[in-house]
Image (cartoon, rainbow, N blue to C red):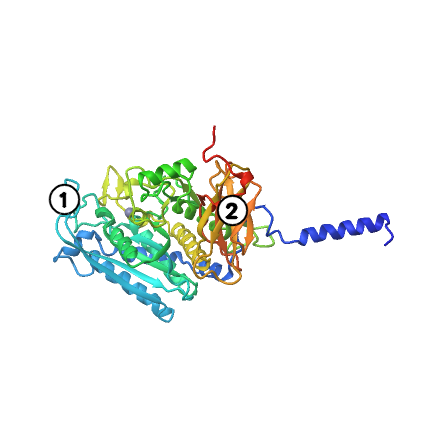
Amino acid sequence: MIVTPGSVLRSLRAASVVLLLAPLANCQQPIAPAPSDPAIAAALAQVSPDRIHATIEKLVSFNNRSTLSSMETDLKTGTGVSAAADWIESEFKRISADCGNCLEVRRDDFIEPPQTGPASRILKPTKLTNVYAILRGSDPAQANRMVLVTGHYDSRNSDNFNTHDPAPGANDDASGVAVSIESARVLSKLKPPSSIVFVAVAGEEQGLNGSRHLAQLAKSQGWQLEAVLNNDIVGGDTTPGETMEDKTAVRVFSEGIPATATPEQARTLTNLGAENDSSSRELARSMAEIASTYMVPQIHRAAQGTPPGRPHSNLVQTTPAFHPVLIFRRDRYLRGGDHTSFNAEGFTAVRITEWRENFDHQHQNVRVENGKQFGDLIQYVDMNYVANVARFNAATLATLAFAPGVPQNVRVETASLDNDTQLTWSAPTGMPAGATYEVVWRATEDPNWTMMQSAGTDTRIKLPISKDNVVFGVRTVDSAGHRSIAVFPMPRRPPRSFIQPAQTQPSSPKN
Ligand SMILES: [Zn+2]
């Protein structure tokens, strides 16, 4: 070949094309949003603010959904918590009928014993009912894997023992139940390989009794719950004059040190700098990524009419994308929620709540005082906001249900002092063909994963990055790009035979 300036230029161009076309998969790269799955996007487009309005309106119509009202015998027909439970069950069955009986609709009925102590909110044996519907996974190898969405359908007014006066509970928490039911409606047409559970629990206001029972049931029955999304107060307060509410933001609360950690385990996590990497927090990080795929800025076109002097009705206005704000604490001050029942059983669970709460419209008797309206009334719920929360939930549920299971036995080798990182893991049950592993990492002061590198189908990787300087996670991704939740690696010393004598280090650093 005769080398001329032109041929050099051509081969340089060809090389750069090859470089551009070379798969980036095995390189370190910034994390970009996963590709949108057209089936999930189509399901999200079905979320209906009108349907959500109808659900919340119906729940409010039961007058008072106090858990204690299940024991009353003088309630007007069609009111009280038991009538609400029956209606939720019928709604799940109606949705199931629309998808060829794709849902297993169940009731979890039980008697809650009275509580003792001055703060008791259940004074006599009380009937509780959780209602749930399971969309069973289509892959037998993965059907035991589950993601779950829940809200509480019980309500209260100023007096926790009041069972007769209005306690509309439109925001707290008919809004969360509406998210659960709407998610069931739009996702029931999908056939993910693993299962999705849609839940409405009672007893939240009495002490998380319903969720506790369901979490214990899940544990005793061996549900492989990989994510629990608790939606409580997701109405997007619309009180006139309220200027601090952010209709584009929703909070996601997650625990740091797991509730189930023993003091010794908590000490280990703290020593490792792992107090910010519980499975619940990794779920929250996944949710932020999923939102970046599906909750894109909304474009509003002028719906009708053309302003004078303009040839086309082409006004376009964008609003900021609806987005989660990750709050790195278990819950708000002075408050608790049903996710903690699942955390207490060792499950991965987060709480989803509107950006700014209005306490005049929670746990209040419906009344007007000095011209100010109190009470959890439907007029203060923004149906478009709840619809966005429902899309965010449905996107999370569907993505995780389509994604492979999380990598198992994720470990970082810590046999010797070095500046590299070696990670190992094993396949989850039912790892589908074409699925691969991804290592993700972030600077220790960063909230979310920022970098990634594919490991292909290997179950180990060595990276020239110091494990002391960043936080690593490992996750799976299927051939369509659905990413699992990342798993924080725990340290492991490899077998002695794996350690080269020259690399052997004293068991503890000298400094
Ligand atoms: Zn609540």
**Which amino acid, by three-letter code, is at mark 1?**
Thr
Q: In this view, does 288 lie to the left or right of 17?
A: left
Q: Nearer the viewer, mark 1 or mark 2?
A: 2
**Which amino acid, by three-letter code, is at mark 2?**
Phe
In the drawing, what numbered circle is on residue 498? 2
Q: At which x and y percent is residue 458?
A: 54, 54
Tell me if mark 1 has few (under 14), some (14-19) or many (20+) residues whose alpha carbon lies within 10 angstroms of its own.
Answer: few
Q: At which x and y percent is residue 493?
A: 46, 43
Quadrant holding the N terminus? bottom right
Query: Which quadrant of the figure has residue 138?
Result: bottom left
Tell me if mark 2 has few (under 14), some (14-19) or many (20+) residues whose alpha carbon lies within 10 angstroms of its own.
Answer: few
Q: Determine the residue positioned at 21% across, 44% down.
A: 365
In the drawing, what numbered circle is on residue 116? 1
Q: At which x and y percent is residue 370?
A: 24, 37
Asked which secondary structure carries label 2, the reply is helix
Q: Do the residues labelled 1 and 2 touch (CB within 8 Å)?
A: no
Identify which residue, 221 or 384, lies in the foreground.
221
Q: At which x and y percent is residue 49?
A: 39, 56
Asked which secondary structure carries label 1, the reply is loop
Identify which residue, 102 or 226, lies in the foreground.
226
Identify which residue, 52 or 205, lies in the foreground.
205
